[in-house]
Amino acid sequence: MAVSQTITDTHVQDFIIKAVNNVCSTMMRQEASFVERTAEVAYTGFKDKVYVFGTVGFEGDVNGVVYLCIPDDFASHAASEILGMTPGEVTMSGGEVVRDVIGEITNMTVGGFKNALCDIGFPCKLTLPTVVRGNNLQVVSLKSATRHIFQFDCAGHRLVADIQMKHE
């Protein structure tokens, strides 16, 4: 395959849309609809309720990190769908089950994004996922990184994919 000399905004958007759609449809049997590309104001409503943030980095010919910002109630729904558990069973199992599922969703999503980067000539490797749950959470811009924020709807919930990357 031909090697691209630059990663365009269109590449980033196309790659994350495909990755989010693939993971939601494969793992949860839910469609994810791309809503819009936004600025930092995407986090305006985040102090009003609890969110789960999953993050996975990538490093190599391009370096960066992807944050998936997921409402807590959707994170529990995803765990229920993926693990075949009732909502009550997910609640009784405690937060670790939800964290594990969101870690896996994040890892698979960023893996799909990273594979698309590799396909256009930017090989890189993934870091381990990290998951944080709470309210009043926000993502701070990394110094000298290009930031791309995308919003999706899935099963009636708004998901945010926040991508920060740089390549030399």
Image: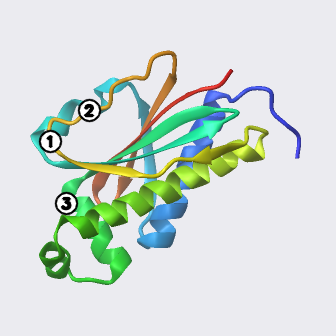
Q: Residue at x 19, y 38 (%)?
A: 46
Q: Amino acid at mark 1?
A: Asn
* As drawn, 125 above or below 103: above
Q: Sequence order check: which comes first, mark 1 or mark 3?
A: 3
Q: Are marks 1 and 2 in contact (CB under 8 Å)?
A: no
Give the camera-side residue of 114 and 129: 129
The quarter holding residue 67 reads: top left
Residue 72 appears in the figure: yes
* Residue carrying label 3: 73
Q: Where in the figure is residue 130, as x and y percent of width and height?
A: 37, 49
* Callout count: 3
Describe the element under mark 1 as helix, strand or loop: loop
Q: Residue furthest right?
A: 2
* Residue carrying label 2: 138
* As drawn, 45 above or below 134: above
Q: Residue at x 37, y 75 (%)?
A: 82
Q: Where in the figure is residue 20, as x and y percent of width and height?
A: 49, 54
